[in-house]
Amino acid sequence: MKEKSSGQKQELRIDIQIILDRLDITPENLSYCRGRSTLSLIAPRLFKSCASLKQNYVYLALEEELPLDPPSSPFALIVIGWAPKSYHNTLFHLVEVKEPIDIYHLLQQIQQIFEEIYHWKDQLQYALNHDLGIGELCRIGLDFFKNPLFIHDSQFNILACPLHTPEMPAWSCNEHTGFETVPLELVNDFKTDPEYQQTLITRGADMFSAGLRGYRILYVNIWDNDDHYKGRLCIDELQSPILPGHFMLAEYFISVIKIAMMRRNYGVQSFYRPYEQFFQDMLNHAVTDPVLIQDGLDAAGWKMDDCYLCIHLSNDQRKISYLSVISTCNYIEGKLSDTVAFPHRDGIAILIRNADQQEYMPQISYIIREGLFKAGISNLYHNFEDTCFFYRQAELALKYGLKKNPMIWCHHFKDCILDHILLWGTTELPARVLCPEGLLYLKSYDAENDAQLYHTLQVYLDNERHATQTARDLFIHRSTLFYRLDRILEILKLDLKNSGNRLYLQMCFRLLEE
């Protein structure tokens, strides 16, 4: 039914099939012989001679006007009558019209078809260039395809649905995001349907049979530049027949939608990326209710006590376009699993779950170098409720780091934490996010297990690492002290030979006593 496609198109291509779909001629009076060549037609012309033919035009001719010897290069031809047998080969796209029709009337029809398609293209480009959103793009698509259509993302959230008819499933409301979504029972049907499972690997437009829904659905999957499935366009065959030429036009349509998605241009009133607003609110400390935070994490598939890391990217040396920022965010999310990245304040906010330094640092380093960014990186943390404080750590890391050495591109909060404590104490950040996670663990471990690791470390540092005096003050044997110290260092992951680390820990002891 359709021409095989290698994927989503970036340019609008009009071929003979699209023209035939719209001609006011009964199918019984048309004979179409498709050629092997791929032609992108821009307008119709009257046939005059083989010497003047160009591949990007469709030519109209009367049968008596055609020479017996066809041209040697591929072209598209519509003949009123019968073409010589020499034209019936795979080199040409040949249509024979088997009913009497005025050639100038046919030319006018085809010119109008091109005008309608170009007008649709112009509407899409206007909406795209003026950031009118996916909702407006789909409204334009609805008027063109004459059938209800919608777009959903990879989690079945409805990105846009300009017309909902009774035959279509009633959308559910996702309680976590507030957005409309495909009903759970239908999603479960999809999971067990072999045909649907096969559609998840499709490139280009294809048809989903009427078996599951009762009507056919023309669909095009949306794949990002890293070959990740991002959702799909569905055109439901409910109000007019889906025609062969619609496949190619749907592929062009989704290429425009894909650009809007890459720009994160969903439209102010129609749809905002699921979960991004939640993460924005967390950074702004606008969500503090643990129940609401847990709901947001549930929706994103994250957990409260997972390991997290915040990164703040900025570039103060030059203006960066919004599209460049969005492109960087998309690249980060495509390269790093369990990561969200979005524009925030004067830069880009990155939240990484279960951060593996060996995985994220090479990618972040590449982004920093190529985009001429500077990065501030927080400490690791295990309580998502503290995200706003740890993102502030990333911002402060960049601030202090650039003052010390503006030539370095990547700055960690652990390297400037003493500067911040000396300047601000706990007036901006609470003690629990200023202290190393290992020290907090020692304190909680002692409370839960009636141990003395936290106190042992404090006495050991107060005695300037003198083992004999420390053991005497604690009333323990030296071997017991060394056992405890081995356990402490295993948990703390700080080098106590470093004088800066020792000063940092002693300041933390004082902060935690307040």
Image (tube, rainbow, N blue to C red):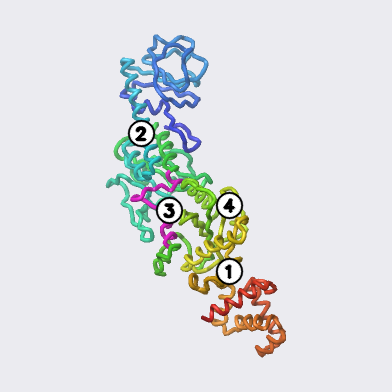
Between 459 and 170, the one nearer to me in the picture? 459
Label 4 crowd (10 A; few <14 / some 14-19 / many >=20): some
Of the numbered discs 1 and 2, the one sitting upstream in the chain is 2
The magenta stretch is 260-281
Asked whether, in this view, residue 136 is left or right of residue 221, the answer is left
User: Looking at the rendered structure, which numbered label has been put on residue 120?
Assistant: 2
> In the image, what residue occupies the spot 49% across and 67% down?
389
**Nearer the N terminus, badge 1 or badge 4?**
4
Mark 3 or 1, which is nearer the eye? 1
Query: In the image, residue 400 lies at what x, y percent?
Result: 57, 63
- Disc 2 to disc 3, how far (Cα)? 30 Å
Look at the numbered disc 2 and give the secondary structure of its residue: helix
SS class of the residue under badge 1? helix
Mark sitting on residue 155: 3
Residue at the spot 40% in from the left edge and 10% down from the top edge:
65
- Reading the image, the residue beneath label 4 is 368
CB contact under 8 Å: marks 3 and 1: no
Which of marks 3 and 2 precedes in the sequence? 2
Report the mark closest to the observer, 3 or 4.
4
**CA–CA distance in space, label 3 to label 4:** 30 Å
